[in-house]
């Protein structure tokens, strides 16, 4: 099966600019996650979707971050305006609905904010 | 809330055995996952424990004690390619939307 697809692979922007990341999960996976991973740390959950509904966005900085999964398939994560501390790898993951199912991760987007 | 602790770094020798510990404090528990992450790559799934005991998968084994809030990942016959970060992650209950929360990871260096 095809894996989780993410683009772009790398992005460099200046602070206060905006940026968007795209994710296409594994076909049939109901749950989609966006994680932020700062260098040397574990992934931090930003938002979790079940089909096209938000299940958890308690850790999403909603003043600058937004995400959508309109048709319950692919998803976009946007940052506007970016700050220096947003420099990180943004990982998208998907999983089937069952709670014992592991997450499958994409290769991530490495964002550098200068 | 949830708290997951792992050692930051470990070093081991090729061919040896290494045990990476993980302790957790969570308000709810629905399983513990171990992931491997090579530098610059995505995490990949290694193992899942939801009941107490040992799960073995080839050179890798994972143990869970729910009463102690403790797990370990055991890597046998270490190879150079096992140099990576190992992430412990705990899945919460329905109250927390079954969120998967990760520890900070343990960076393992395998030396010849």
Image (spheres, coloured by chain):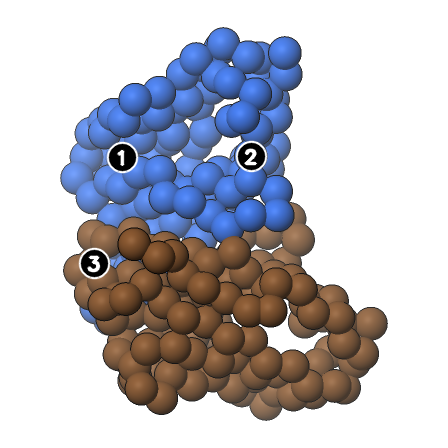
Q: Residue at x 57, y 12 (%)?
A: B13
Numbered tag placed on residue A99 in the rendering: 3
Q: Residue at x 35, y 57 (%)?
A: A2
**Disc 1 designates what residue?**
B64
Viewer-nearest residue: B11 or B59:
B59
> Where's the N terminus of chain A, which quadrant?
bottom left
Which chain is represented by blue in the image? Answer: B
Q: Colour of chain A?
A: brown
Report the residue that reaches farthest toward the front. A1
Mark 1: few, some, or many residues within 10 Å (few <14, many ≥20)? Answer: many
Q: Percent position (x, y) of residue A101?
A: 23, 53
> Where's the C terminus of chain A, which quadrant?
bottom right
Check if mark 3 and mark 1 are on a common chain.
Answer: no
Viewer-nearest residue: A47 or B28:
A47
Numbered tag placed on residue B84 in the rendering: 2
Q: Residue at x 55, y 69 (%)?
A: A7
Marks 2 and 3 sit apart, C-alpha to C-alpha, by: 26 Å
Q: Percent position (x, y) of residue B44?
A: 42, 45
Which structural element holds mark 2?
strand
The answer to which quarter of the image holds residue A57 is bottom left
Chain letter of the residue beneath label 3 in the structure image: A
Residue A45 in view, yes or no: no
The answer to which quarter of the image holds residue A37 is bottom right
Marks 1 and 2 sit apart, C-alpha to C-alpha, by: 22 Å
Q: Nearer the viewer, mark 1 or mark 2?
A: 2
Chain letter of the residue beneath label 2 in the structure image: B
Q: Nearer the viewer, mark 2 or mark 3?
A: 2
Chain letter of the residue beneath label 1 in the structure image: B
Mark 3: few, some, or many residues within 10 Å (few <14, many ≥20)? Answer: some
The answer to which quarter of the image holds residue A38 is bottom right
* Left or right: B95, with A2 as reference point: left
Q: Percent position (x, y) of residue B112?
A: 63, 11
């Amino acid at each position: 099966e095809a894996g989780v697809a993410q683009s772009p692979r790398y992005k460099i922007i200046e602070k206060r600019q905006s940026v968007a990341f795209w994710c296409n999960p594994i076909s049939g996976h109901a749950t989609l996650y966006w994680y932020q991973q700062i260098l040397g740390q574990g992934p931090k959950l930003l938002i979790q979707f079940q089909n096209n509904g938000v299940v958890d966005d308690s850790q999403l900085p909603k003043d600058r971050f937004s995400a959508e999964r309109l048709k319950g398939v692919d998803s976009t994560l946007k940052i506007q305006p970016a700050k220096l501390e947003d420099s990180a790898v943004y990982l998208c993951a998907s999983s089937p609905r069952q709670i014992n199912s592991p997450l499958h991760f994409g290769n991530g987007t490495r964002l550098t904010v200068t | 809330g949830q708290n997951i602790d792992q050692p930051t770094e470990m070093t081991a020798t090729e061919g040896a055995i290494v045990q990476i510990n993980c302790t957790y404090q969570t308000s709810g528990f629905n399983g513990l996952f171990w992931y491997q992450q090579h530098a610059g790559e995505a995490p990949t799934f290694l193992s899942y424990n939801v009941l107490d005991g040992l799960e073995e998968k080839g050179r890798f084994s994972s143990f869970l004690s729910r009463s102690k809030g403790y797990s370990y990942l055991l890597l046998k016959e270490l190879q150079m390619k096992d140099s990576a970060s190992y992430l412990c992650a705990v899945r919460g209950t329905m109250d927390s939307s079954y969120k998967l929360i990760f520890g900070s990871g343990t960076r393992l260096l395998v030396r010849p």
